[in-house]
């Protein structure tokens, strides 16, 4: 796919809000290398970089959808600031204090004027939750994944019962409950959850 | 009743007033229970946030394509969404018994034989109950003009959900508003795996009804080659009828 490198901030914001594949690819190809550099240079891995980049982008996406994103800087500056902050918070939580790339510090200094401390905290918390839930969800049984997707896609319990060949809605509800229990048990047993709870 | 059950009922408003009040008192005094309820709330918010989950899956695919291992893209997409989409479709669609016709059928005849309304099976919950629920009812009753009006007015403030877009596209097709129907189906393709197979199927039917035989044939051929497509056998039948 040919990637244009001249999208305006407005075009990027609009494309991101619509999850336009071309814009998403453009954002990823253009800005991920900077985030990867930032994370790997500061005690992180490729996988950390990917998680940080994607969750930062989702956090920006959610702000656009909610209508509370007022960009006073270029899109990439904002996105990198969010990613930078998220990673900084991760490092703080992991008790890793070194964070001294000159480039990074420049981004961080700039960020102070763009994003509030409160927003940074929220983004960092969201990052932890999202990564954890996403990972654990993919480990529960496929039946349960389907059932919970159906339920949260607002498909009626009657249809869910029909699909799973259950006698009635009560049985479907019980199955949903068991699926949720499996999900919560796995979340609670995960080391990340234990760490958050004991901070 | 187990704690997890009680929490679920509490969050889904299924406790009566006394049970609810007792539960809230218990929560205030038991830190562990209160933390458990918070966890449930967060996970529920995550599971309800389908747009973000979908965005994340699209980003995973881009990462795998541009920076990583291509195999894992296929794994993510096919192991989760595609499987879910396929089984949802099979489970929710009303299957029809197809009789083979020996005589040649017109496009319109093939369309009317195969174009069953998609049963979305949605039970609308929450604040938007009235308008969307009524839109689905009108759609079920084949009152397509009214359904379109209601779907469109529901979409005036927010993007219409993909299930509704599918029904809207089918409604437009029924009223021969083909350009609008095509827009609806194409807005689903590539954006919502759960309804993507259905969008392809109804797009092909729409093309058939609109007399765009070559384009319709092309889409049916694609479906017929995809054994995982829920309408795979029907696409083969239609191609035979079209020839």
Image: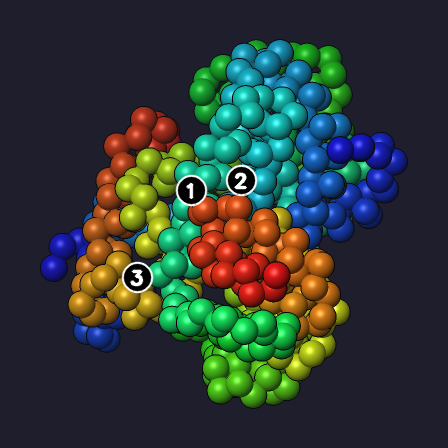
A75 is higher (above) or lower (below) than B31: above
Please indicate whether residue B122 sits to the left or right of residue A55 in the image.
left
Instruction: Name the residue tied to disc 1.
Output: B80
Q: Are marks 2 and 3 on the same chain?
A: no
Identify the disc placed on residue B221: none
Residue drawn at 42 percent across, 59 percent down: B89
Residue A148 is situated, as x and y percent measured from the top left of the image, at: 35, 53
Please indicate whether residue A10 sits to the left or right of residue A190 in the image.
right
B161 is higher (above) or lower (below) than B143: above
The answer to whether mark 1 and mark 2 are in CB contact below 8 A is yes
Residue B67 is situated, as x and y percent measured from the top left of the image, at: 63, 22
SS assignment at label 1 = helix
In the foreground, B130 or A158: A158
Letter of the chain that mark 1 sits on in the rendering: B
The reply to whether residue B65 is visible in this rendering is yes
Letter of the chain that mark 2 sits on in the rendering: B
Instruction: Name the residue tied to disc 2.
Output: B57
The reply to whether residue B162 is visible in this rendering is no
Q: Are marks 1 and 3 on the same chain?
A: no
Q: Between label 1 and label 2, give the one nearer the viewer.
A: 1
Letter of the chain that mark 3 sits on in the rendering: A
Please indicate whether residue A158 sits to the left or right of residue A104 in the image.
left
Quarter occupied by the C terminus of chain B: bottom right
Residue A127 is situated, as x and y percent measured from the top left of the image, at: 51, 36
In the foreground, A90 or A166: A166
Instruction: Name the residue tied to disc 3.
Output: A163
């Amino acid at each position: 796919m040919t990637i244009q490198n001249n999208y305006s901030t407005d075009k990027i914001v609009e494309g991101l809000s619509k999850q336009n594949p071309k814009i998403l690819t453009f954002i990823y190809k253009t800005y991920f290398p900077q985030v990867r550099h930032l994370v790997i240079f500061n005690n992180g891995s490729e996988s950390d970089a990917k998680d940080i980049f994607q969750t930062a982008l989702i956090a920006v996406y959610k702000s656009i959808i909610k209508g509370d994103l007022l960009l006073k800087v270029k899109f990439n500056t904002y996105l990198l600031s969010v990613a930078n902050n998220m990673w900084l918070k991760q490092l703080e939580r992991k008790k890793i204090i070194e964070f001294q790339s000159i480039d990074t510090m420049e981004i961080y200094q700039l960020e102070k004027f763009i994003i509030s401390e409160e927003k940074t905290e929220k983004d960092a918390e969201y990052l932890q939750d999202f990564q954890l839930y996403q990972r654990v969800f993919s480990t529960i049984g496929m039946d349960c994944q389907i059932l919970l997707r159906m339920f949260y896609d607002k498909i009626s319990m009657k249809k869910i019962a029909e699909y799973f060949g259950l006698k009635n809605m009560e049985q479907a509800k019980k199955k949903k409950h068991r699926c949720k229990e499996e999900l919560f048990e796995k979340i609670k047993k995960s080391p990340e959850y234990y760490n958050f709870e004991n901070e | 009743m187990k704690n997890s059950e009680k929490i679920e009922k509490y969050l889904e408003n299924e406790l009566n007033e006394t049970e609810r009040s007792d539960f809230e008192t218990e929560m205030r005094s038991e830190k562990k229970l209160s933390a458990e309820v918070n966890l449930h709330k967060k996970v529920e918010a995550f599971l309800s946030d389908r747009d973000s989950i979908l965005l994340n899956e699209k980003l995973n695919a881009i990462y795998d394509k541009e920076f990583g291992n291509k195999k894992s893209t296929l794994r993510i997409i096919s192991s989760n969404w595609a499987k879910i989409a396929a089984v949802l479709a099979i489970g929710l669609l009303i299957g029809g018994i197809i009789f083979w016709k020996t005589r040649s059928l017109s496009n319109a005849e093939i369309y009317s034989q195969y174009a069953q309304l998609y049963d979305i099976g949605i039970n609308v919950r929450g604040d938007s109950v009235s308008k969307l629920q009524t839109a689905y009812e009108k759609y079920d009753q084949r009152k397509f003009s009214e359904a379109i009006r209601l779907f469109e007015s529901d979409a005036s403030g927010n993007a219409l959900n993909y299930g509704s877009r599918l029904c809207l596209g089918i409604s437009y097709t029924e009223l021969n508003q083909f350009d609008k129907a095509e827009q609806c189906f194409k807005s689903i393709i590539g954006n919502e795996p759960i309804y993507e197979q259905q969008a392809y199927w109804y797009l092909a039917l729409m093309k058939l009804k609109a007399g765009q035989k070559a384009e319709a044939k092309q889409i049916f051929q694609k479906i017929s080659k995809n054994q995982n497509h829920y309408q795979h056998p029907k696409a083969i039948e239609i191609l035979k009828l079209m020839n």
